[in-house]
Amino acid sequence: MSDGRRGSKDITKPGELEALRSQIDELDVQIVKLLNRRARLGVQAGHAKVASGRPVADSEREREVLVRVAMANDGPMPQDALLALYRQLIETIKRLEELKGVGSEGDSND
């Protein structure tokens, strides 16, 4: 018996879908908290770079982060999708650093 959706699979246990969705919802909350923590740390790192006279942008560090993330990935998330998410995360944190004024106090590293 099919419900007309491609790739759909009958869920045999009552409440299984709801339980899975509940776990997903809990993980989403944790992921948001972790992403915000990651962003705060990125902004703090930007301030520390400025304070030590280093440029805010650090392409070598970005490459290191992406390599580390790729090495930590044991699936099922496809590598290219995971790296795209991290590239977006890095770009978002850079924009957040700009909004927070990192590097703008007398810093000439445009």
Image (tube, rainbow, N blue to C red):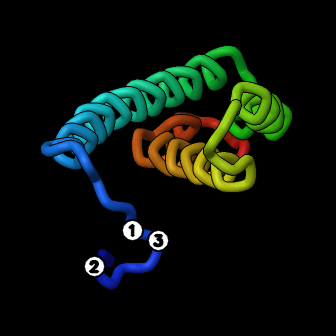
Foreground: 18 or 98? 18
Residue 3 is marked as 2
Circles 3 and 1, Cβ within 8 Å, touching? The answer is: yes
x%, y% of residue 41? 48, 22
x%, y% of residue 10? 32, 60
Instruction: Identify which residue is drawn at 73% across, 54% down.
Output: 80
Task: Classify 10 Å Cα crowding around label 3: few (below 14), some (14-19), many (20 and above).
Answer: few
Is residue 27 visible in the rendered image? The answer is: yes
Q: Amino acid at mark 2?
A: Asp
x%, y% of residue 55? 74, 33
Task: Classify 10 Å Cα crowding around label 1: few (below 14), some (14-19), many (20 and above).
Answer: few
Task: Classify 10 Å Cα crowding around label 2: few (below 14), some (14-19), many (20 and above).
Answer: few
For disc 1, the marked residue is 8
Whichever of callouts 2 and 1 sits on the residue coming sooner in the sequence is 2
Real-space CA distance between mark 3 and mark 1, rounded to the nearest whole angstrom: 4 Å
Q: Amino acid at mark 1?
A: Ser
Circles 2 and 1, Cβ within 8 Å, touching? The answer is: yes
Real-space CA distance between mark 2 and mark 3, rounded to the nearest whole angstrom: 10 Å
Quadrant where the N terminus is found in the figure:
bottom left
For disc 3, the marked residue is 7
Foreground: 50 or 72? 72
Q: Residue furthest bottom?
A: 4
1 sits to left or right of 35: left
Instruction: Identify which residue is drawn at 66% across, 22% down.
Output: 49
Q: Provide the secondary structure element on which disc 1 rests.
A: loop
Instruction: Identify which residue is drawn at 52% across, 42% down.
Output: 93
Real-space CA distance between mark 2 and mark 1, rounded to the nearest whole angstrom: 8 Å
Instruction: Identify which residue is drawn at 53% across, 28% down.
Output: 42
Q: Amino acid at mark 3?
A: Gly
